[in-house]
């Protein structure tokens, strides 16, 4: 057991006492590790608070029981801590990465990101991970000595690379980035503070990435069922879920639907978490890493699903894509949200002065690309509510994002 109440860490865990430090040096805290300070800075950031009113799939008007970016982030954080604890990783770093992973998401969930990406295509596109990096390195303006949050190198590395390396060993973009290239914001920061884009992130970032997948699968099934986009019988199409439902029926016959949905969601999380712990233990034993550098230098992720659970994860995502993300009701709302984002982008790029002074300052003689990026930063920071109100202030008509029973494809009696 370590002194000062620190938890035990495996030799391959990220050690806050051996951090590569911050871009702008700061005196050490007498009461918190660098990773604990990063977690706290993220929680106290403006971008984190705004997650409360940014949605996942449904617009906020639909109901208070569906996930927002904030509730999703908290669920990811809980799962990431559980994985880190079981694997002997640094829980504070895993938590910081979980809490920061969605900071760059726009209003209206993935709809807003897709819309902004299309509108920004001539100027480098828009990517929520790159936007999160912009937020924590320059857009947050709270501290007297620097812009951004001045996070530790390990936190920034994990934020950028939690889904794996961005570059091949030869310097070419990985397949995910081969067509469009690495986002400029990441390359610009990497030139100042190299994040080793061709190597894997530390194990805490890998744990946070899987926690995100686990939370998505579980809570999107939960939200989709409760919204009536599909029902429990439809889940027979996914053998992994059908097996869990059969288990629930055997243990709790005639269980009311709301409780059955919760039992399904919690069992999905449990099976996935237990699988990650077991599979990661096998991979760690095979690699026998003596330090975190060996994790980064590995040829593949060390914290991972087993092949069987990876297949189940893919099957769940395929089901959700068809039955939830592409549901006619969801697509109808997405189309309306697209209009709001496009209208705001067009207005602000044509008239930067229509933005608040803190956003329009210095754009009098700016290039088209610089104006567009500033506008994208402004819109990306908006909550769903703020974007709707901004549109109503600037335009005579604003699309109604409320759902109706008809838009969900449900009979009136079931709404």
Image (cartoon, rainbow, N blue to C red):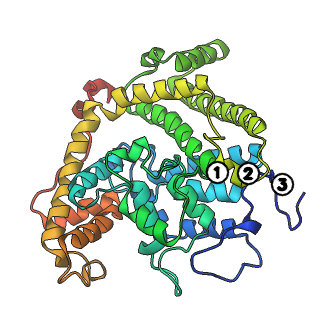
Q: Which residue is mark 2?
A: 89
Which element type, helix, strand or loop, lies under badge 1?
Answer: helix
**Image quadrant containing the N terminus:** bottom right
* Residue 50 in view here: no
Q: Nearer the viewer, mark 3 or mark 1?
A: 1
The residue wearing badge 1 is: 296
Pick out the residue farthest to the bottom.
144
Give the image quarter of residue 92.
Answer: bottom right
Give the residue displayed 44% in from the left and 30% down from the top: 317
Residue lying at 69% horizontally and 43% vertically, measured from the top left: 83
Instruction: Please say if 118 is above or below 362.
Output: above
Nearer to us in this view, 38 or 249? 38
Q: Nearer the viewer, residue 95 or 137?
A: 137
Residue 348, x across and y down, in percent: 18, 69
Q: Which mark is residue 8?
A: 3
Task: Say whether disc 2 or disc 1 marks the residue closer to the N-terminus.
Answer: 2
Which is more N-terminal, label 2 or label 3?
Answer: 3
Helix, strand or loop at label 2? It is loop
Q: Position of residue 396 (x, y in %)?
A: 9, 62
């Amino acid at each position: 057991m370590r002194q000062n109440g620190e938890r035990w860490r495996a030799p391959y865990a990220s050690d806050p006492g051996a951090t590569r430090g911050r871009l702008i040096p700061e005196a050490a805290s007498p009461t918190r590790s660098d990773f604990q300070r990063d977690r706290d800075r993220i929680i106290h950031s403006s971008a984190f608070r705004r997650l409360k009113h940014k949605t996942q799939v449904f617009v906020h008007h639909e109901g208070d029981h569906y996930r927002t970016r904030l509730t999703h982030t908290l669920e990811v954080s809980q799962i990431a801590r559980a994985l880190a604890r079981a694997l002997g990783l640094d829980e504070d770093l895993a938590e910081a990465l979980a809490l920061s992973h969605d900071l760059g998401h726009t209003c209206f969930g993935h709809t807003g990101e897709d819309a902004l990406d299309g509108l920004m295509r001539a100027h480098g596109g828009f990517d929520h991970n790159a936007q999160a990096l912009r937020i924590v390195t320059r857009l947050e303006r709270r501290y007297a000595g620097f812009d951004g949050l001045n996070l530790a190198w390990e936190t920034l590395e994990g934020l950028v690379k939690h889904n794996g390396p961005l570059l091949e060993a030869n310097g070419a973009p990985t397949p995910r980035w081969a067509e469009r290239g690495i986002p400029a914001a990441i390359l610009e920061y990497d030139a100042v503070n190299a994040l080793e884009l061709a190597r894997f992130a530390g194990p805490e970032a890998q744990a946070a990435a899987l926690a995100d997948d686990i939370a998505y699968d579980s809570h999107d099934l939960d939200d989709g069922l409760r919204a009536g986009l599909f029902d429990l019988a439809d889940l027979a199409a996914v053998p992994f879920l059908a097996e869990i439902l059969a288990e629930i029926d055997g243990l709790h016959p005639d269980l009311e639907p709301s409780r059955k949905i919760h039992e399904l969601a919690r069992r999905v999380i449990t099976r996935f978490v237990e699988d990650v712990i077991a599979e990661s233990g096998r991979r760690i034993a095979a690699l026998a890493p003596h330090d975190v550098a060996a994790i980064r230098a590995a040829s593949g992720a060390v914290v991972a699903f087993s092949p069987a659970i990876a297949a189940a994860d893919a099957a769940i995502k395929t089901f959700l894509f068809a039955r939830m993300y592409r549901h006619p009701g969801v697509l109808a709302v997405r189309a309306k949200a697209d209009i709001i984002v496009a209208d705001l982008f067009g207005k602000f790029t044509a008239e930067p002065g229509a933005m608040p002074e803190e956003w329009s300052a210095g754009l009098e003689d700016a290039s088209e690309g610089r104006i567009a990026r500033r506008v994208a930063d402004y819109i990306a920071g908006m909550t769903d509510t703020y974007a709707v109100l901004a549109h109503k202030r600037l335009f005579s008509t604003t699309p109604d994002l409320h759902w109706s029973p008809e838009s969900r494809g449900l009979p009136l009696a079931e709404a």
